[in-house]
Amino acid sequence: MAAWMMILALTFSSSIDNLGVGISYGIRNIRISHFSNLIISVICFLFSVAGIYFGLWLSKILPGIMPVVIGSFLLVVIGLRIVLLAIPRKVVVEGAEGEVASTEINGLTKNIGESGGIGFVESIFLGIGLSANALTNGLGAGLFGLNPIAICVTAAIGSFITVWGGVALGRKIAHVRIGKFTLGQFGTLISGTLLLIIAFAAFF
């Protein structure tokens, strides 16, 4: 897989949860200002930097093909975990909020933003919660030797766009389902599947 395709795929994967969270906020008519969204994006950028440079350091001390093997294994584990999180549970939850808040990340939205918008502190906590994928994806990208600046910048931009788009989308579609999945669950499923594809494509 070409380097730029892997960068775009990793960016999409790390940002898809942001879309789900944005939808959850939009459904409840909770506003995320551009400033708050910018804070979230900056945190995503910093987590990506930390992950990718640690991965680059590991790639220098590990012999031969080991960086690719470890990077692929890491993405497989993360991808499988995300896919399992997306599978609908047989739990009856009333209301649109319960349907969308089906993943660990979406669970963050339950206790934040009750005032109609989120503040500075809430933006930081939300940014940290949403940046877990950026950290692990950055680590994998570092092991693959991808461009650090490209990964970090695209991750931050992707975070900003998907949070903004998710909030706007959530205000319009509260009960949309794709088969057995809510829109948020389906996005999470795509994210995990994409990581699995990247992991296997790294060997070709």
Image (cartoon, rainbow, N blue to C red):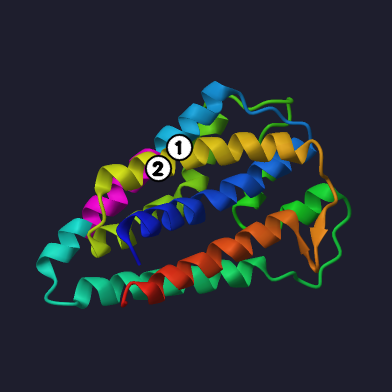
Report the span colored magenta. 44-55
Badge 2: few (under 14), some or many (20 or more) residues near its Cα, within 10 Å? some
- Name above or below for residue 86 compared with residue 52: below
Where residue 145 sits, quadrant-wise, is bottom left
Residue 111 visible in the snapshot: no
The residue at the point 74 percent across, 52 percent down is 100
Residue 114 visible in the snapshot: yes
The residue at the point 64 percent across, 37 percent down is 165
Numbered circle sitting on residue 154: 2
Is 74 displayed left or right of 132 in the figure? Answer: left
- Name above or below for residue 31 compared with residue 171: above
- Name above or below for residue 177 compared with residue 85: above
Numbered circle sitting on residue 157: 1
- Name above or below for residue 142 compared with residue 78: above
| Residue type at tag 1 | Ile
**Marks 1 and 2 close (CB-CB < 8 Å):** yes
x, y percentage for residue 185? 69, 60
Residue 80 is inside the magenta segment: no
